[in-house]
Image (cartoon, rainbow, N blue to C red):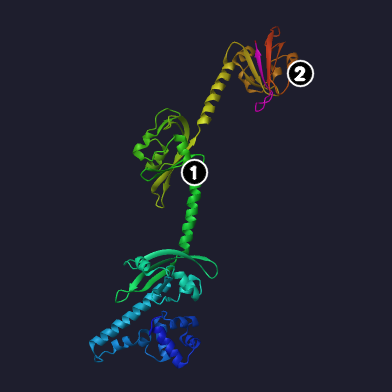
Amino acid sequence: MKKNGFGERLKTLLKQKKLTQAQVATAVGTSIPSVNRWTKGGEIEYENLRTLADFLTVNWVWLRYGDEAIESLNMADPEDSPMKDLRREYLNQILENEARMKAALKMAQIINWEWNVLTDTVNCSENATALFGVSTAHLPNCMLPFTQLSLEELITTFGNGQPHNWDYQIVTDNNEIKWFTSRAELVYDAAKRPLKVIGISVDITDRKQAETALEQSEYTLKKIIDIVPVGLWVADKTGQITLANPEVQRIWGEAKYVGLDRYDEYKGWWEKSGEELGAKGWTLARAVEAGETSKPEIVNIETFDGKARTIIMHATPLRDRQDNVIGAIEINQDITELKNTERTLKKLLEQWQAVFDQAEFSVIQLDETLNIKVLSEKIKTELNLTDNALNSELLLSDILDTTTTDTIQKKLQGAAADELTVFTLKGNTKTNDNEKNMLYVIHDERQDVDPMTLIFIFS
């Protein structure tokens, strides 16, 4: 605390007048800790200063600023001297500005403080204990993480003519974590010697919590993007590709972060027409340029490592609150294996259909209840089946005689379910009782196959 300063004058007056801090607090209408802080040179509000001076019956200017201020006011100028009036006006403006500044800092919940480099004492605003959440004894620990610096380090950090900023966290008396940001600067005396560090501190706990939550959210989103089993592209409002996840790298063999004019470096052809997409055909390009939300579209592509793949692509634009397009997202789903399976299955089905379309022999396919599933064109012709008959449910007994049908059923009952069974018999169809045909019956009841599927081939 400054010698012969405000705090020293106040303590001397209390001692002379035999007043306790509690009495002063009651008279001024404040708390005992506030009075105690004043005796140590702490800041005092203008209204409290005037009330305190009136209670102690002293000049408030002298009490706050000392003899030099009184001497300045009482210079040998006539009472009606313009200079004396001017000094009084300046002093009133200084006091009013000081009061306004303190009120503004209080409303903004800003803590102002100063640390005397020489005496290692701290003075701070009245709101410090409430905002820091600690007792008066713990205040220096909150504001002064730099007190152990050497004088050279202190000058380097705070004395370069620019305020020094830093963020830090404290533990309150209730064991809560709070974050603050401080801004301080070293002040020199008239001889250019380091005098004190003056600074302010602001609670930024909410901001830090929001930043932490945002970091966690971004981390979670990145993990999701990395592991989703689809290729994910992101482009900005100009169409420049800014993000491609690992699945994109796998599908395409590489990810090129190009703009709209170079989208044709990605080679693709429409599944239906076989036409090349070009730069403008990709759903990502259409989402950026036209704001189009596309439906899934199938495209055959040639990857950068020379492989042929088939993908489903679709995209959606990203918009701001004014509905302006600010970017787009495209999804690529690799369906190469599915399409290959589909093509193989289609070929097999075409081959199987050819069995029923040929004219050399008649073929009937039955289900496990001996209901007819498919008839070849040859047997339809031989049996003279009408459209009404074909649309109705046909049984094996509808086209074979009873004896042949019973024989087949007995054969099936003795057939092993886990192996392919072939047997031969003679029987009549109902087209001609005198006609004799060799009949082949194939029973297949393997796993994952429609049980009791029967194929009859008439020679």
Q: Which mark is residue 130?
A: none
Is residue 28 left or right of 90 when viewed as pictured? right
Q: Is residue 5 magenta?
A: no
Q: Residues within 10 Å of mark 2 (few under 14, many from 20)?
A: few
Give me the residue at 75% from left, 21% from top: 413
Quarter of image, res 73 = bottom left
Check the picture and name the quadrant holding the N terminus.
bottom left
Give the CA separation, mark 2 to mark 1: 60 Å
Is residue 426 left or right of 351 when viewed as pictured? right
Give the SS element for disc 2.
Answer: helix
Residue 436, how many percent across, how many down?
69, 7
Q: Which mark is residue 410?
A: 2
Is residue 98 in sight in this rendering? yes
Q: Nearer the viewer, residue 158 or 271?
A: 158
Is residue 279 in sight in this rendering? no
The kind of residue tagged 2 is Lys
* Pointers 2 and 1 in contact (C-beta within 8 Å): no
Give the SS element for disc 1.
Answer: helix
Residue 91, how many percent across, how many down?
31, 83
Q: Which residue is mark 1?
A: 226
Is residue 393 left or right of 320 when viewed as pictured? right
Residue 364, how many percent across, how many down?
64, 17
Q: Is residue 455 magenta?
A: yes
Check the picture and name the quadrant holding the C terminus.
top right
Residue 82, how many percent across, how many down?
23, 87
Q: Which residues are magenta?
A: 445-458
Q: Is residue 114 above or below residue 310?
A: below
Q: Which callout, 2 or 1, points at the residue further toward the start of the chain?
A: 1
Quarter of image, res 189 = bottom left
Quarter of image, res 37 = bottom left
